[in-house]
Image (tube, grey):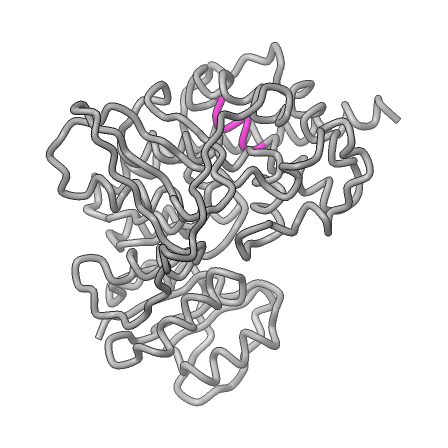
Amino acid sequence: MKKIAIIGSTGSIGTQTLELIENNLENYDVYALTAGNNISLHKKQINKFKPKFYDNLKQIDYDIEGSSLLDSLKIVNDKNLDFILFATSGSDTYSPIVNAINSGNNIGLTNKEVIVIFGPLLFKAANRNNSKIFPIDSEPSAIWQCIDNEPRNISKIILTASGGAFRDIDFKDLRNITPDQASRHPNWKMGEKISVDSSTMMNKIFEIVEISYMFNIPFEKIEVLIHRESLVHSMVEFDDGSIKAQISQPDMILPIKHALDYKEFNLKYENKLDFSEISQFSFSQIKKGKYPCYDFSYEYIKKGPLYVSALAITNEILVELFLAEKISYISISKYLEMTLLNQKFNQEFNYDNIIELREYLTTRISKLIQNKK
């Protein structure tokens, strides 16, 4: 049986992963579960799946027979594991991810922030420690499925985007958008932060970076198109002009399954499309001015990896402030540009400098907001 640890078991991806495993317990052993603040759900999961180890932010010992409280860093270093799913969000969760990679464990990542901010360091460490990093995200998983064992040269990658919650509203009409409104995605069930990023199209900027880092593809070869139906999850064009697309229901369990089940295909799950019920596949260019965060960031990411880290950190801080109702929705793009414009980030790309960068940007954003009051 494949021993699995889920870091962040009570979130959207964590619960969907356990739903998948519950129907395939003959193949999978839930070896460890960790969670944040949803203690009641976490305890129910521990009781149901009886993992050997668990952890939670509040360090509560549930006293469940057969399961023991253990620190997350010790869990991800466990050599008995076959796969660790990191279903957490936010770049501050990078430490256990780095530890898992340095231990040579194979991991699945849903966390765009960690890949974008630390990416080159993570993939270098993975190569050094013979650790595999699997994408658990609709678009990168789609690209992976299209190019796996594909001998032809890639001409370009075509990422698809739903357009987010406000795709039919002009940016000038978004002044009074609430966090609740921005957290509702039209096609997917996702967490708050990624739903906001979808609405600003920052998630596509991060996917450009993620795919470039993960598959060694230059930014210039990655194109983004609006695809409202969210059925074509991305495409690859080859040098001969042919295009391979990954098409399926908007269902996060499918990329989870592909990572967990890679090359074995033992997991029982299906959510099939009926093409007779699909009236169209629509694709369109991103309109200039519709997504100011995207417009600014598309060129900014070409400055270098530490600039990419600064962009992702700044966006993360600003989205947190918006979700806490400390800044308005339209202020995200305004402060993103104000924070980063004319700033130079030419230091060496390493963990220490990235941590210092976060401290600097947090202070800078705070001062900018205070000066605007």
Q: Residue 298: horizontal and vertical position, in percent?
A: 50, 21
**Does residue 183 appear left or right of residue 173 in this picture?**
left
> Which residue is most to the left?
151
Q: Which of the pair 261/362 is nearer the observer?
A: 261
Quadrant placement of the C terminus: top right
Query: Is 58 contained in the magenta span?
Result: no
Q: Which of the pair 25/148 is nearer the observer?
A: 148
**Does residue 152 appear left or right of residue 145 in this picture?**
left
**Does residue 207 appear left or right of residue 311 in this picture?**
left
Q: Residue at x 51, y 37 (%)?
A: 203
The magenta span reads 307-313
Q: Residue 214: horizontal and vertical position, in percent?
A: 31, 36
Q: Residue at x 29, y 56 (%)?
A: 259
Query: Is 308 contained in the magenta span?
Result: yes
In this rendering, the answer to whether 89 lies above or below 260 is above
Q: Which of the pair 126/248 is nearer the observer?
A: 248
Q: Residue 206: horizontal and vertical position, in percent?
A: 47, 34
Q: Main secondary structure of the magenta part?
A: helix
